[in-house]
Image: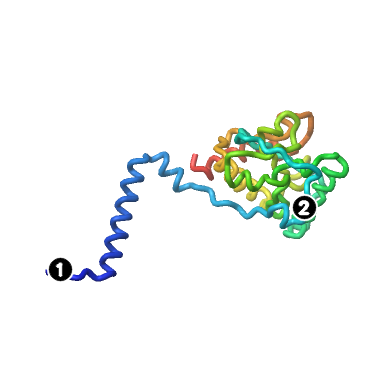
Amino acid sequence: MSVPVPRRAVLRGAVLLGAAAGATALTQIGDHDARAVATRIDQPEIANCATWGARPPSTNVSVVQSRPNKIIIHHTAFPNTTDYSLAQAYRNSRDIQNLHMDTNGWLDSGQHFTNSRGGYLTEGRHGSLYALLHGQTMVQGAHCVGQNSQAIGIENDGIYLDVQPPKALWDSLVWFCAFTCQQYGIPSSEIYGHKDFNNTQCPGLLHDRLPELRTAVAARLGG
């Protein structure tokens, strides 16, 4: 005669079996992969172009059918605002796009993403966020001569020739670089400054802190 098994016992058995299977799976994939799973970087909040009120590009953006191999850090060289609000981050993104389209004659914002002094992240060039989240392609930018089809450009609002960025901006930059490295498989060692490739002072004192940034990103990635 069969004896009915209480539903709670069935569920408990399933949970225990699942836990055992998970432990076996972690053992099989090895310690390195287990650490990678444990240190996966959550996506930071990133406002897309529609959210901050971007103009449409003047022509279609170009999509590169390969992953970027590096990140390039910039500063906007705009005055250092004391308004750290989300609204200011959106205004800043519009100001950058207007400058790049109306003065520089570019089809859209030149950088892929912008990081505000309050630590708010926005999409720069249209399509950049979609590409980042899917992790297989990139939008061609206009932020660094010779690197626009292979490097993700991050603009950090402000000018840092003789002052350091706010902590909120720095913390956001570390998180976002770690997430970008994860999405595209970019080593933390492949984070550079604009002046590494072009004759410019950009990104100011942020360039001096690139070793610190690489180390912080590597730590986030579990390296």
Depth order, front residue of 1/92: 1
Residue 29 in the image, given as x and y percentages of width and height: 37, 40
Amino acid of disc 1: Ser
Residue 75 in the image, given as x and y percentages of width and height: 75, 42
Residue 211: image quadrant is top right
Check the image and name the residue furthest to the left: 1
Residue 74: image quadrant is top right
Residue 87 in the image, given as x and y percentages of width and height: 76, 60
Q: Residues within 10 Å of mark 1 (few under 14, many from 20)?
A: few
Which residue corresponds to the image point at 78% horizontal and 46% vertical from the top-left? 57
Badge 2 is on which residue?
54
State how far apart marks 2 and 1 are (Cα).
Answer: 67 Å
Asked whether the beta carbons under mark 2 and mark 1 sit within 8 Å of each other, the answer is no
Badge 1 is on which residue?
2
Q: Is residue 204 left or right of residue 172?
A: right
Which residue corresponds to the image point at 67% horizontal and 53% vertical from the top-left? 168
Q: Is residue 178 left or right of residue 118?
A: left
Q: Relative to residue 36, is residue 148 depicted above or below?
A: above
* Residue 87 is at least partly visible in this image: yes
Depth order, front residue of 209/58: 58
Q: Is residue 41 left or right of residue 34?
A: right
Residue 192: image quadrant is top right
Q: Residues within 10 Å of mark 2 (few under 14, many from 20)?
A: many
Amino acid of disc 2: Ala
Q: Quadrant of the N terminus?
A: bottom left
Residue 33 in the image, given as x and y percentages of width and height: 42, 41
Depth order, front residue of 17/222: 17
